[in-house]
Amino acid sequence: MKTTITCLLLLFSFSIFSQILNGDFEDWEIDSTNGTPIEIPANWKSNNDHTPWGGSNTPVLKVQGPAGFASKIESNYKGVDAQSSGFLYQEIDLSNIKKISYEARCDSIFKKGFCQIVLFGLPEMDVLYTDTLWAKDPDFQLHEFEVEETWKDDYDFAQLKFIANGEIFELDPQNDGYAAFTVDNVNFEKIAGSNEIARNIDLKLWPNPVSNSINFVTPNNHNPEYIEILNLNGQLVKRFAFQSHLDISDLSDGTYVFAFIFKEAVVTNKVVISL
C-alpha cells in the first residue's frame, strides 16, 4: 500500500539533529589510481595524496573512535622548511543551520603544534569561526558552536575544516611543532520554522510496514536533499542522500520516523519495520 504525505505549513520552530555527510567516519574509500593505495573518509577532502615516486602521504588516518571509526589528523613532515599541517574538511550549506557540534581530542602536542577547527565562508574563505586546542587530552570532548545569523546573511556555503598544525624548520628548531587531532561524530542542528515557504509535496512511499527495502516517489523530480531515519526518541539512526529505493534490512524491528529534508520544508512520516 502506498502512503501519500502532504507537507503542511510549519507554524512553529523546531530543531532537527542531522549528521554532516559521513560525520561518524564509518565510510572510507580507497584511492589506488597512482601508486600506493590510500584511504580517505567518504564525503570529506583531505591532504592525503600520492607522492611523485609512487609512495603516499597520509596525514589523515582511520582509527578507533568512541563508537566505531574516527579520523586522526596528524601534522605530517614533508620536507625541510615545509608547512606540514594535516587537514580534513567538508563544504556545507549554511542555510537553516543553528549549531555545529563534534567530538575531538588532541592526542599529541609538541612544541608549537596545536589542533584547530575553522569555519570559512565561501568562496572568499573568510574566517567565520575558529577554535584552538593547545592541550593534550586523553578523552574525547564534545565541542559545539552556534552559527550566527550574520554568517548566513553573507554566505550560503562554508567550509568546515579540522587541522593538526605543525611544521619542521631545521634552520630554527625552536619553531618546530607537531600535533595529532582525532575527530568524530560531526553533526549540525538544523532549524525549520514558520518563515519557511509552504509547498504541497506529494511524496509517496511504499510498502509500509516494510521488511527489506522501501521506495519513494516525488512528482516532477522535486526530491529532498536527503533522508534521515530517527527512532521515536528523536535520535538519529541513519542518514542518506536521497534515493528512490532504500535498503533498510540492517535496521531492527520497530517504528521509525522518516524525515525527508527539502530546502524549503521537512516532511516526516512514521514507518513500521518488520523483518
Image: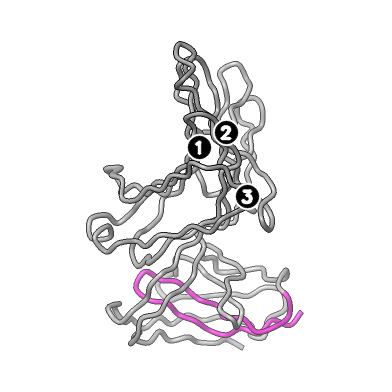
Segment colored magenta: 252-275
Q: Determine whether the residue tagged by mark 2 lies in a helix, strand or loop.
A: loop
Q: In x, y percent, where is residue 180?
A: 57, 38
Q: Marks 2 and 1: CB-CB under 8 Å? A: yes
The residue positioned 23% from the left and 55% from the top of the image is 154
Residue 221 visible, this angle: no
Q: Which mark is residue 59?
A: 2
Residue 249 visible, this angle: yes
The residue positioned 45% from the left and 14% from the top of the image is 172
**Mark nearer the N terminus (2 vs 1):** 2
Q: Is residue 136 above or below residue 37?
A: below
**Mark nearer the N terminus (3 vs 2):** 2
The residue positioned 62% from the left and 44% from the top of the image is 29
User: Would residue 263 be counted in the magenta stretch?
Assistant: yes
User: For residue 81, what is the image quadrant?
Assistant: top left
Q: Which residue is mark 1?
A: 164
Q: Is residue 258 above or below residue 160?
A: below
- Magenta stretch, main secondary structure class: strand
Q: Which residue is mark 3?
A: 70
Tell me the amino acid under the disc marked 1.
Ala
